[in-house]
Amino acid sequence: MNIVDTRANNTFNFVKRKNIKNIPLFNISFLDHSMDISDYTDVIFQSTPSVEFFNHHKDLRDKNVFAMGPGTQSSLSAKGISSRIPKDPGSEGLKKLVNGDIGPGKFLIVKGEGGLNIISDYLEAEGAEVDTIQNYQRVRFSSYSNLRKDFDNADFVIFPSRLAAEIYFQEIYNPNINSKFITISTRIKDYVDSLGFDNFRLNYFADNFESEILNIT
């Protein structure tokens, strides 16, 4: 069975799987974001790269730290930082979680260039003081011609991000190859659904992730 994961480097580094081949479809690069975060009471990380590329981990010890989902939380935990995540991962779940913490504090949101503004817009609408920093950018490859053959024998293709799915269907997809598609969030699944492709949403961080894929027929 040939299973291909399209996660970018510096994402979900804590995930180790023996039987899944990783083929990134874009690069992630650091953006300078040097700043004094001492005035912030609450810090929200929107993705695992936002954690990996953050310059100020040591300054988070006295902050309320929130993560978008279990992957981001695991990245923080690997650096010794405790965080809270919503019951339902994603922006809507996080809105519900932070609602009880909106008060006299000050929020900092850490995300990638072009990342979603749902949380920052929500906090501002609720009257919270909030700032946003972008500490990384996603960079598409200049060409994908050399990568297409790597997907020719893929029984399953995993999309851990919407951008990976977008690039795959724009640059890689071959209708003559009968790959099945795995998505890991509602947002990614909705995108692939909108293109008319069947896909299976699975828990990317579950211990039985590989076996769950193999159970798909």
Image (spheres, rainbow, N blue to C red):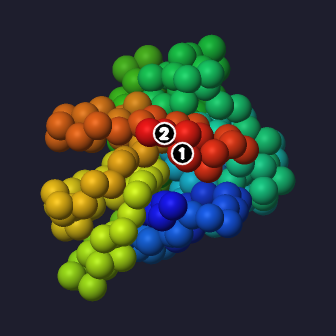
Give the image location of residue 160, x and y in percent.
46, 51
Q: Secondary structure at mark 2?
A: loop
Q: Residue at x 61, y 50 (%)?
A: 210
Q: Residue at x 67, y 66 (%)?
A: 18
Q: Could you say which quadrant of the image residue 189 lies in?
A: top left
- For residue 8, above or below residue 141: above
Amino acid carrying mark 2 in the image: Ile
Q: Secondary structure at mark 1?
A: helix
Q: Residue at x 51, y 61 (%)?
A: 1
Q: Which residue is mark 2?
A: 216
Give the image location of residue 176, x and y in percent.
17, 61
Q: Could you say which quadrant of the image residue 14 lies in?
A: bottom right
- For residue 204, above or below residue 175: above
Q: Is residue 81 visible?
A: yes
Alpha-carbon distance for marks 1 and 2? 5 Å
Which of the numbered marks, if any, corresponds to residue 66?
none
Give the image location of residue 206, x and y in percent.
67, 41
Comparing 15 with 33, the one in front is: 15
Comparing 201 with 70, the one in front is: 201
Residue 126 vs residue 68: left or right?
A: left
- Mark 1 touching mark 2, by CB under 8 A? yes
Q: Which residue is mark 1?
A: 213
Amino acid carrying mark 1 in the image: Ile
